[in-house]
Every structure is written in C-alpha cells, then in structure tokens.
Image (cartoon, grey):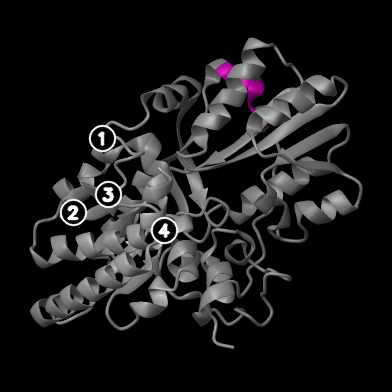
C-alpha cells in the first residue's frame, strides 16, 4: 500500500502524464476550437489542484472550474443565521464540525457567540455529540449536521446511537446536500459550460460508479472518479479529455481501490433508514427540490428543527460572490472582496473560511505575490 501511495505522488509519473495532457489538450483544441472545460465537483479536488500546482501548470491548456462540492460553502446564509440563533438559547450545548463556527452569518458567527459565553463545541464525529449529551443530561445537546453523501451516513450513525440508547436530550439540526441534483441543475441551466467532470473520490465511496450514469445517458457528459494525489488528478484529467476527444462519453472509475461500482451498501442503508428527501436551499442558488435529506418522521424526536423552531429574517445583501464561485460562474479573484476585505483571517463568505473552499485555496496557493 505504501508503494502505491508513493506512486500517486511520483514526480516522474506526474511529468509523463502532464506531457500527455498537453498533447491531448492540443489535439482537443485543434478538433473543437477551444480548451476542454472540466469541473472538479469536490472541494477536496479544488484544494488539491491548487495545492499541487496542477491548475497553474495546465493554465491555457485545460480550463479547470471549481464546482459546488464544499459542504460549508453551499450552506445557505439563512441556515447559518438559524444555527447562530439556535446557539443563543439557554441551557444548550451546540456541537459542530470546525469550519462552521467561523462562517459569518448576517451579523455574527458561531465563534463570536462562543466568545460571548455560549457553549459551542467542535467535534470530529457526530457520535461524539451523543456522548456529550449523555454526560450532560441537564442540557439540550444539538449537533449541526451539514455535508454531502460522504458525511450523511455518519450522521445516521449518531441518530442510530441516540435512538437505540434513548438519549432524550440529543437532537440534530440537519441541512445536507446531494450531488446529483446540483449537477443536474448546473447542466440543465447551462450557465457554466462544462465538458466533463472530475467526480468526487470521497462521495463516490458511498455512491459508487453506477450512480453517475445519468450524466452519460441524459447529458452525454463524461466523468472520471479520481483521488487527490498529483498522479491521480492528472490521470483523471487525461482520461476525461480522452473521452471527450474520442466523443465516447462514459464514467470511468480511476479510484477503484476504494470505490466500488455499487458503492458502500451499508452506508446507503443508513441513509435510507434515517433520512428522506427534502428541498434544500443552496447558497447563492436557491431552493432545489429533493436536493437534500432530512430526518425521517419516525425519528422526528431527534430533529432539532422540530424541537426548536426558529425563524430568521432574509440575510442582508453583500458584495460577497460565494454563490457565483460555487456555481463556477466566476473565479475567486473576480470577486471584488477577494484578498481585500475578505481574507482567511477576516472571511466574509464561506468559500474563504472552509478548508475546501475555492477562495481559500486560491488565496493560499494561486495568488500572485
């Protein structure tokens, strides 16, 4: 396994693949009169192409577009305001993944609420919040459950434990997102021209290769599931362009050592058991029907949205263009706030906060000094 991992970051293999991409991208441009435009769906891919230098090396040859695959970045502003409002209540412990507590709401962040004395804790697994609930029976413990299909099964595990162990002071505020509805929306609306997709390595572990065939069957758009090391990224880019050049759209699983055709059936069963489809609001995009999963009615006693109903006002309009960034409409540098009013130490929008955000990746790895 160690030898395999070394190969994934091999400079020699990377150079060979890079030369092959230059060649095939030139042939693509000669045939179609433009650069191939590929969208990296996953936020981890966005960070990886920036951090490894792949995006800079391919500039002018391959157009790499950052997609809506960062769970923090796509969380709607009103959802963030509601989470902050939730934290203001008395006798509560709010548990969250780390990135969320720095995301600005309309007036403040979860971090500022924590500074003001609210009990807000970062956990690394949702089930840790259940443990905190058992240790604090006199408090209401609420976990803020965001994420794509990668995370939803682990949210299910926490619900399973809380339900089976009858942890009555635990609940979950769920605002999850699904990959298929947002890709369909991007392709249906056609605001951003995408020739092919670098499909997410993490989400695909749960979904499996077979879940993506709608891209080919209905849209004739190819995709390659790939990992995050330089050789894996370059191989994914090469194979996608090869499919485009040959006009043979298909889904290729280049991450076969961990992604199966049928996906992770146990994880899918957890999602099916504890969640049901719901409309979800996406930042800068709006509500998309059946684009998320909410807790099933059978487990509604664990649904914090029902236990603590909260209404928040529409957010104030700002110059932040995170909504355009996550749709691939603009590059982060095209936002007037980028690297000026909005920096990693003073983020205005979630794309600058998140470790998988396009703006944070561009600021850290792509910005000209």
Position of 29 compared to 246: left or right?
right
Query: In the image, which disc is placed on residue 229?
Result: 4
Q: Give the Cα distance between marks 1 and 3.
A: 11 Å
Labelled pair 2, 3 in contact (Cβ < 8 Å) = no
Q: Nearer the viewer, residue 290 or 136?
A: 136
Secondary structure of the residue carrying numbered label 3:
loop
Mark 2 or mark 1, earlier in chain? 2
- Residue 186: image quadrant is bottom left
Q: Nearer the viewer, mark 2 or mark 1?
A: 1
Decide: few, some or many residues near mark 2? Use Cα within 10 Å; few <14, some 14-19, many ≥20.
Answer: few
Is residue 301 inside the magenta stretch? yes
Q: Residue extending furthest right? A: 117
Q: Give the Cα distance between marks 2 and 3.
A: 21 Å
Q: Residue at x 8, y 62 (%)?
A: 247
Residue linked to disc 2: 219
* Dominant secondary-structure state across the stretch colored magenta: helix
In the rendering, at what x and y percent does residue 46 appear?
45, 63
Mark 2 or mark 3, earlier in chain? 2
In the rendering, at what x and y percent does residue 276 appear?
45, 27
Relative to 260, residue 368 above or below: below
- Residue 32: image quadrant is bottom left
Mark 4 or mark 3, earlier in chain? 4
Q: Residue extending furthest bottom? A: 369
Position of 117 compared to 255: left or right?
right
Residue linked to disc 3: 254
Give the magenta-colored segment's residue range. Answer: 299-304
Q: Residue at x 65, y 28 (%)?
A: 127
Labelled pair 4, 1 in contact (Cβ < 8 Å) = no
């Amino acid at each position: 396994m160690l030898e395999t991992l070394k190969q994934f970051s091999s400079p020699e293999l990377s150079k060979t693949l890079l030369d092959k991409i230059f060649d095939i991208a030139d042939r693509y441009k000669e045939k179609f009169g433009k650069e191939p435009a590929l969208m990296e769906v996953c936020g981890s891919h966005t960070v990886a192409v920036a951090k490894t230098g792949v995006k800079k090396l391919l500039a002018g040859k391959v157009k790499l577009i950052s997609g809506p695959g960062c769970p923090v970045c796509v969380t709607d502003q009103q959802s963030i305001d509601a989470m902050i409002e939730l934290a203001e209540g008395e006798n509560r412990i709010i548990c969250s993944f780390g990135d969320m507590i720095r995301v600005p709401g309309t007036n403040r962040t979860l971090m500022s609420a924590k500074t003001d004395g609210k009990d807000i804790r970062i956990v690394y697994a949702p089930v840790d919040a259940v443990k905190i609930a058992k240790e604090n029976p006199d408090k209401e413990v609420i976990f803020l459950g965001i994420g794509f299909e990668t995370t939803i099964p682990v949210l299910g595990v926490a619900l399973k434990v809380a339900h089976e162990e009858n942890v009555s002071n635990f609940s979950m505020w769920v605002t999850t997102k699904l990959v298929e509805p947002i890709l369909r929306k991007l392709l249906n609306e056609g605001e951003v021209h995408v020739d092919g997709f670098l499909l997410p390595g993490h989400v695909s572990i749960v979904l499996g290769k077979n879940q993506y065939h709608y891209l080919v069957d209905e849209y004739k758009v190819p995709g390659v599931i790939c990992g995050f090391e330089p050789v894996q990224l370059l191989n994914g880019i090469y194979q996608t362009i090869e499919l485009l050049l040959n006009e043979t759209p298909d889904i290729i699983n280049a991450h076969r050592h961990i992604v199966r055709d049928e996906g992770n059936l146990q994880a899918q069963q957890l999602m099916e058991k504890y969640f049901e489809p719901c409309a979800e609001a996406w930042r800068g995009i709006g509500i998309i029907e059946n684009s998320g999963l909410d807790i099933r009615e059978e487990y509604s006693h664990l649904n914090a949205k029902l236990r603590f109903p909260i209404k928040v006002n529409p957010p104030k309009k700002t110059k932040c263009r995170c909504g355009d960034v996550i749709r691939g409409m603009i590059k982060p540098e095209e936002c007037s706030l980028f690297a000026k009013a909005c920096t990693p130490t003073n983020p205005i929008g979630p794309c600058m906060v998140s470790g998988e955000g396009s703006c944070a990746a561009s600021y850290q790895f792509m910005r000209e000094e």
